[in-house]
Amino acid sequence: MSQRVLLLGATGQTGSSILNGLLEYGGYEVAALVRPSSAETPKVKAVAERNVKIIAADITGPVDELANILRGFDVVISAIDALSMHVQENLVTAAKKADVKRFVPCAFITVCPPGGVFRLRDEKEAIYQHIRKLYLPYTIIDVGFWHQISFPTVPSGRVDYASMYAPNTTIHAGGDTPNLLTDLRDIGPFVARIIADPRTLNRSVYTYSDVLTENEVFNMMEELSGEKIDRDYMSAEAIEAAIANFKETLEKEPENVPARLALAMFQYFLSKAIRGDNQPKSAKYLGYLDARELYPDFEPRSFKSFLKEVLDGKGEKVYKDNEGIEHLKKWFSDLGFPL
């Protein structure tokens, strides 16, 4: 018998990967939960054309109404945007009322402990604690850093087309800290396996293809491209100073979206480049299960193979339709912060 899965955020970067993975893996009857204002957009219509039922609902509306929508679904997966973590609380409460068998909250970031290291992680943690308070069955899935935002650009400009920003030649805090990396396209296949697995119920799981330092990534790009990258260096002190600056801005302007996104970016650097949170030994200490150990049948795309695709002109830029990312890049540039 197939599992019924309801996916929130099916048209986003992570959500699209999850949708692809569920449909390709098989054994799932998938529906997509969308905002009423988005139901007739081209992206949502494209999802519907894949034999995915579209359910339009306001997840901030009455819990009982939302519970009626969720009733009968085995799994609810949230891939909501980074600025809307708190909105999931209603969805969690409704899922409990609807007797959903497994709730997958919007995690899908680097491994990091809660408690003041990374604001975005703590916003997610508030949802995890609401889940646990209600004794709602869950699985938390973190994916390290995407291949698609982990590669440097080269002097010829041949990979600029696929880079979220260019030039991208900055090494953070020395560049010698190992990091978990997952290709965005492999998140879905991992999720499809994880939610079918009773071993992952009420557990956290991490995915990856490679564990590499920034210096190893740059060296690999130089080797494959035949080009020497003129590296820029951002010190740990500069990262910490930027975090303090953005926190100060947010104390005065709590709704400043560019400052929130900027703080998240620099706290990523703090966690993965300075503290070393995003690596297997940290994940295992924090109680995560290793998806590579759980699913030896699945071979994710290696970072090296991904770089070859990008150099062959076969890469794809992430967030290419997101105007907010473009505004943030300009804001960083105006402030004089290299990424």
Image: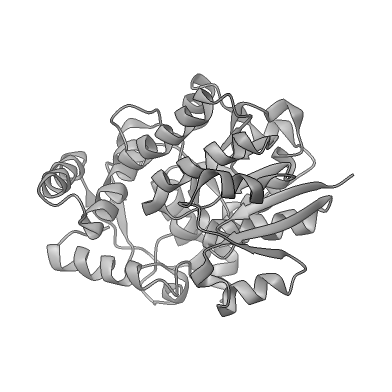
Q: Please state if 294 lies on the left or on the right of 237 as rendered.
A: right
Residue at 67% x, 70% y: name it: 47
* Residue at figure coordinates x 39%, y 77% from the top left: 156
Please tell me which residue is depicted at 35% across the width and 42% down the height of the picture.
Answer: 120
- From the image, which quarter does the C terminus lie in? bottom left
Where residue 13 appears, as percent x and y from the top left, is 53, 61
The answer to whether residue 260 is above or below residue 287 is below
Query: How many numbered discs sit on the rendered protein?
Result: 0
Relative to residue 336, is residue 58 drawn left or right? right
**Residue 111 % position (x, y):** 46, 35
Q: Is residue 146 above or below residue 330?
A: above
Does residue 279 sit above or below 219 in this rendering? above
> Which residue is more in the foreground, 245 or 160?
245
Q: Position of residue 260 (x, y in %)?
A: 26, 52
Q: Is residue 301 visible?
A: no
Quarter of the image containing the N terminus? top right
Q: Is residue 25 left or right of residue 124?
A: right
Q: Residue at x 21, y 63 (%)?
A: 332
Coloration of the structure image: one colour
Q: x, y percentage for residue 74?
A: 73, 41
Q: Is residue 18 visible?
A: yes
Instruction: Pick whichever, 230 or 212, lies toward us.
Output: 212
**Most distant residue in the right direction:** 1
Which quadrant would residue 313 be assigned to in this image? bottom right
